[in-house]
Amino acid sequence: MKTGTLKQVLLITDGCSNQGEDPIAMAALAKEQGVTVNVIGVMEQDVIDDQGLKEIESIAMAGGGVSQVVYTQQLSQTVQMVTRKAMTQTLQGVVNKELQQILGRAKTVEDLPPEQRGEIMEVVDELGETVELEVLILVDTSASMKHKLPTVKEALLDLSLSLNARSGENSFSVLVFPGKRGEADKLLDWTPKLESLTSVFPKLTTGGITPTGPALREAAASFRQKRSLRSLLSSDDEQSFEESV
Amino acid sequence: MMMNNPSKNQCNVKPGTVIHGKWHRNSYAVIKELGFGANGTVYLARATDGQVALKMSENPMSITSEVNVLKSFAKVQGSALGPSLLDVDDWEYPDGKISFYVMEFIKGPDLLSFLQKKGSDWLGVLMLQLLKDLQVLHSNGWVFGDLKPENLIVTGPPARIRCIDTGGTTVSGRAIKEFTEFFDRGYWGMGSRKADEQYDLFAVAMIIINAAYLKRFNRAEGGRAQLIKAVQASPLLKKYEKVIDRALTGRYISASDMRADLLAVLQPSKLAAPAPKKTVQQAPPPTRTSRSRQASVQKKKKGGMAETAVILAVISLIYFFYLYSQLV
Ligand SMILES: Nc1ncnc2c1ncn2[C@@H]1O[C@H](COP(=O)(O)OP(=O)(O)O)[C@@H](O)[C@H]1O
Ligand SMILES: [Mg+2]
């Protein structure tokens, strides 16, 4: 089975958006373009507000991804776990689509007897190890995130450690929002080395607004830009995931 | 979509509930919950022929993934790698469906509880047992991954350490599937998260450290410096310092290499275990006999036919005594 590149957005935020487009709609828009949106909600101990929680869940659902709410201290372990889960889930979706083509009906892995699921899981595992992965990390740097930023930085370095252990290629890009000028600033352009983020990661937060919707729109566009730039440079028949999904 | 809150990642099945398998039509009566973690909840249950452990998860693929590992362990004849797998199925209840698998119930306390009750003399012995199992696991192309005291149960008597939770078990050479920070080489900045033997051996060293520092400490400056400082500050860990250091820095080429070193610490005299005894410990269940015999015969090839025959006879004899002692 040939798969293209796995495109994932990892949104790290602590709560409610308050400016611009509806982030849930923007997540759905990203999904339409073959980009999965995953959300990690970073909370202070025992201040989980229901509205923020609901938004986090809804964005991930609309974006076809995974969400997880954590306390700041558990961030590192969570970021790598969510990314891993998200990859598996997306790949599983791809495999399900293939299955439906083969079986000609609305069958998913779960409709198969347990014995046959095993072989499919092996394929998913294998793909997870080897597939080319593009992760766009979208970090909320609104005022309330201030204390959490050092932990976010560590969690991202930890993520690179996990993903670099795979044999497949990775590229990372980091956007922060709100941006100094626009809705989101590009902190790190597409690179295989997420570690290079260390020198540029912000220590200060930027303003009180939280334009999560517009930031998600920028994030999805960032994949497209990268792709078109690539196709200008090379003529190889790179197949992206949206075609196979 | 998956959603997890810190509070909500476990299933909740009441004691007395009977779980019916959709595909294989077996039934299990839940006795009580044994524990839960990131990948599901484990129950003690009654099957037609005795007690079993039943693991359930909201995520059917994590069940499938663990089952795959247990199945491949089963092919390693007679090994004690992980609990043996008994059944895999789905349970359809009035408002939903959930996947589960059924495995051997491994009865006993987890490693740290055992050590607290029985004393730290057991630490070395149990680590020797663990390293022996790891050697087998590694030579079959696996790395355990999420090695930690909670995933180690001491059964017996006679005391025997067993690994549970194959959620982190990874094909050698791939990225580690699941880990816990304190036991993770990457977290301490002491290497990659690629699955290799040394990854597990690092975790073994951290388990020994955890036995002395029940309250796990966080990374400060990280690296060898911080960990060795902790080792040197603990009277319990003094004698293990060299072994821990070498395991932390990836200097053992294999689990048996580390095991030999550890044995030398625990038993400094020249009287290290004689060969036949070793073989017996290595080969508990009956299916394994022919294989382990072969193995020991190969090792002794230089010794000539007569010697081989004698050794074989001795092994068989001890083995039968072993079997007999297991029966009573
Ligand atoms: N085969 C077993 N026999 C006895 N207890 C078990 C068995 N499997 C799991 N347990 C208990 O259930 C707990 C959680 O199981 P585990 O498989 O480690 O779940 P997770 O993958 O979610 O961490 C374990 O810590 C242990 O106490
Ligand atoms: Mg566990």
Image: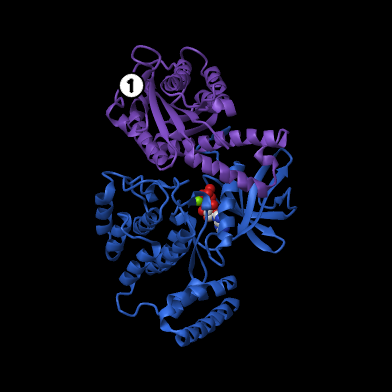
Q: Residue at x 43, y 49 (%)?
A: B173
Residue B325 quadrant: bottom right
Q: Is mark 1 within 8 Å of ligand 1?
A: no
Drawn side of residue B303 relative to residue B77, left or right:
left
Q: Residue B253, position in %: x, y?
A: 35, 60
> Considering only vertical position in the picture, is B47 above or below B318?
above
The colour assigned to chain A within the rendered structure? purple
Q: Residue A100, position in %: x, y?
A: 68, 34
Q: Residue at x 50, y 33 (%)?
A: A68
Q: In the image shown, does B27 or A221 lie closer to the viewer?
A: A221
Drawn side of residue B197 relative to residue A3, left or right:
left
Q: Which quadrant does the C terminus of chain B fall into?
A: bottom right
Q: Residue B8, position in %: x, y?
A: 55, 38
> Considering only vertical position in the picture, is B227 above or below B239?
above
Q: Residue A236, position in %: x, y?
A: 47, 27
Instruction: Please indicate, yes or no, whether residue B50 appears anywhere in the rendered image.
Output: yes
As drawn, the residue found furthest toward the front would be A235
How many numbered callouts? 1
Q: In the image shown, does A214 or B52 lie closer to the viewer?
A: A214
User: Residue beneath label 1, please?
Assistant: A205
In the image, which lettered chain appears blue? B
Element type at marker 1?
Answer: loop
Drawn side of residue B66 relative to residue A185, left or right:
right
Q: Chain of mark 1?
A: A
Which amino acid type corresponds to the residue marked 1 in the rendered image?
A: Thr
Instruction: Please indicate, yes or no, whether residue B235 appears anywhere in the rendered image.
Output: no
Q: Residues within 10 Å of mark 1 (few under 14, many from 20)?
A: some
Q: Which quadrant does the N terminus of chain B fall into?
A: top right
